[in-house]
Image (cartoon, rainbow, N blue to C red):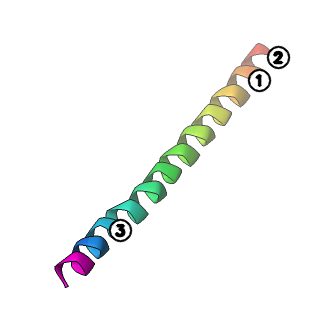
Amino acid sequence: MQNAQRDNTDSMPLRQSPHGVGTITIRFVGLLTLAIVAMTLLWG
């Protein structure tokens, strides 16, 4: 019983972690894209 509870507790943070990393990655890529577009417009 304790092992099952311990596995469930460990699996929850592991599921949340990739989602948070994915969100941060999407935001980073979005900001990077906006920066590139802004530089391209200013440079042109």
Viewer-closest of 2 and 22: 2
Please tell me whether mark 3 or mark 1 is closer to you in this view. Answer: 3
Residue under the point 35% across and 68% down: 11
Q: As drawn, is 2 to the left or to the right of 9?
A: left
Instruction: Please rate how many residues cluster around mark 1, counting C-alpha atoms within 10 Å: few if below 14, some from 14 to 19, many from 20.
Output: few
Mark on residue 11? 3
Q: Is mark 3 on a helix, strand or loop?
A: helix
Prevailing secondary structure of the magenta residues: helix
Mark on residue 44? 2
Amino acid of disc 1: Leu
Q: Is mark 2 on a helix, strand or loop?
A: loop
Magenta range is: 1-5
Q: Mark 1 points at which residue?
A: 41
Q: What element carries label 1?
A: helix
Precedes in sequence: disc 3 or disc 1: 3
Q: Are marks 3 and 1 in contact (CB under 8 Å)?
A: no
Dividing the image into 4 quarters, which one contains the C terminus? top right
Precedes in sequence: disc 2 or disc 3: 3
Relative to 10, does residue 36 appear above or below in the rendering? above
Relative to 5, does residue 31 appear above or below in the rendering? above
Amino acid of disc 3: Ser
Q: Are marks 2 and 3 in contact (CB under 8 Å)?
A: no
The CA span between labels 2 and 3 is 50 Å
Relative to 2, does residue 22 appear above or below in the rendering? above
Q: In which quarter of the image is residue 5?
A: bottom left
Residue under the point 77% across and 23% down: 41
Q: In which quarter of the image is residue 15?
A: bottom left
The CA span between labels 3 and 1 is 46 Å
